[in-house]
């Protein structure tokens, strides 16, 4: 059996893939009302590491109005933030 067939194959790693850090709405409900939440604030609070883009997911409930700035939002998170009379701003 040739050596090239015997050696295990490894997969392809895409170095240009966009990776997102996940933040749930239950983590955002700990902030004060009318707070502007940015990736920098999330990094200071220790919710993200700050190396990747931020995606907000809709796990949990939100009852206070917040202005949330992130790179991506799930559909349920966007609806819950707007339902709580908050604002959603997508960063490019």
Image: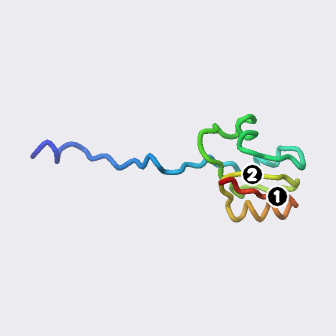
Residue, x 69% and y 65% (percent of image)?
75
Q: Which mark is residue 87?
A: 1
Q: Which image quarter is the C terminus in?
A: bottom right
Read off the residue under disc 2. 69
Residue 48 picture quarter: top right
Compare marks 2 and 1 and give the one earlier in the sequence. Answer: 2
Question: For the view shown, which residue lies furthest in the left direction?
Answer: 1
Q: Position of residue 6 (x, y in %)?
A: 17, 44
Identify the element where label 2 is drawn. strand
Q: Count the marks.
A: 2
Residue, x 78% and y 48% (percent of image)?
28
Q: Position of residue 2 (x, y in %)?
A: 10, 45
Q: Are marks 2 and 1 in contact (CB under 8 Å)?
A: no
- Foreground residue, 43 or 90? 90
Q: Which mark is residue 31?
A: none
Residue, x 31% and y 46% (percent of image)?
10
Residue, x 78% and y 46% (percent of image)?
37
Residue 51 picture quarter: top right
Q: Residues within 10 Å of mark 2 (few under 14, many from 20)?
A: some
Q: Position of residue 49 (x, y in %)?
A: 63, 37
Identify the element where label 1 is drawn. strand
Question: Is residue 85 shown left or right of residue 8?
Answer: right
């Amino acid at each position: 059996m040739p050596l090239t067939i015997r050696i295990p194959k490894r997969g392809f790693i895409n170095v240009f893939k966009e990776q997102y850090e996940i933040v749930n709405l239950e983590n955002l409900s700990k902030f004060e009302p009318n707070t502007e939440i940015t990736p920098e604030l999330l990094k200071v609070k220790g919710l993200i590491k700050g190396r990747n883009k931020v995606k907000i997911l809709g796990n949990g409930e939100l009852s206070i109005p917040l202005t949330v700035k992130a790179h991506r939002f799930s559909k349920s998170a966007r609806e819950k933030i707007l339902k709580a009379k908050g604002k959603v701003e997508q960063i490019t």
